[in-house]
Amino acid sequence: MPLHVLTRGTEPAQDREPNTPRPMNRNTPKNFIVRNVFLCAAAILITSCGTATFTKTGSDATIESLRNFELAFIDEFAVPGKKFNAAAFNAKVNEGNAKFQQAIADEKFTARRPVLVDLKGQFDADAAHLRSKASRGKITPALATEMKKDVNKIYDHALGRQT
């Protein structure tokens, strides 16, 4: 009795009909084209949405500019042993307030406005603290260093850079 493992019924292996490939459907090439066009359109749509978020670089540049202003402000007025000049201090505070107000007014992304308002509030608080310390001659190198560290931390947070 012969062993018929790989053949149908009792046919010997040599008598099997070869596997004939099915003829290709006439719509198959069209389906490939339509699918590829759809995938390309989806990829373009997805990448264009991703690049739209990069337009915030203008906002980021504004925030960096405000950071640099505030750090320069601290460098100018948080100097140990320097006589406090109220007129120059007030002029610089007014300049800072104008910069913050302009940044808030020019901000295109409404979600960023509260961030800028918070940064302005922080600037006002830092200016009041610095005025208090400077007018009493209580400026120390540690105060300036700590204020600058705090400013950098706050601005990094505002820019979404967690430190």
Image (cartoon, grey):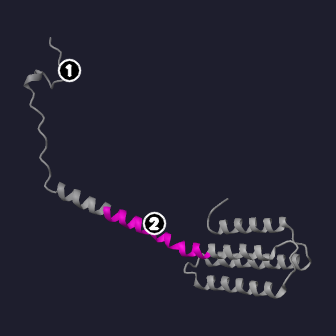
Q: Secondary structure at mark 1?
A: loop
Residue 146, placed above or below residue 107: above
Label of residue 5 in the image: 1
Residue 82, placed above or below residue 8: below
The C terminus, quarter of image: bottom right
Q: Does the CB distance between marks 1 and 2 fall below 8 Å? A: no
Crowd around label 1: few <14 · some 14–19 · many ≥20 (10 Å): few
Drawn side of residue 109 relative to residue 122, left or right = left
Q: Would you say residue 56 sits in the magenta stretch?
A: yes
Q: Nearer the viewer, residue 41 or 12?
A: 41
Label of residue 89 in the image: none
Residue at x-position 79% and y-position 65%: 145
Question: In x, y percent, where is residue 58?
Answer: 54, 75
Residue at x-position 66% and y-position 66%: 156
The N terminus, quarter of image: top left
Q: Secondary structure at mark 2?
A: helix
Q: Which residues are magenta?
A: 40-62
Q: Is residue 7 visible?
A: yes
Q: Is residue 118 visible?
A: no
Q: Nearer the viewer, residue 150 or 136?
A: 136
- Residue at the extreme top of the image, as rendered: 1
Q: Which residue is mark 2?
A: 50
Residue at x-position 10% and y-position 27%: 16
Drawn side of residue 135 relative to residue 108, left or right = right
| Dot 1 amino acid type | Val
Question: In x, y percent, where is residue 100?
Answer: 67, 82
Q: Would you say residue 145 sits in the magenta stretch?
A: no
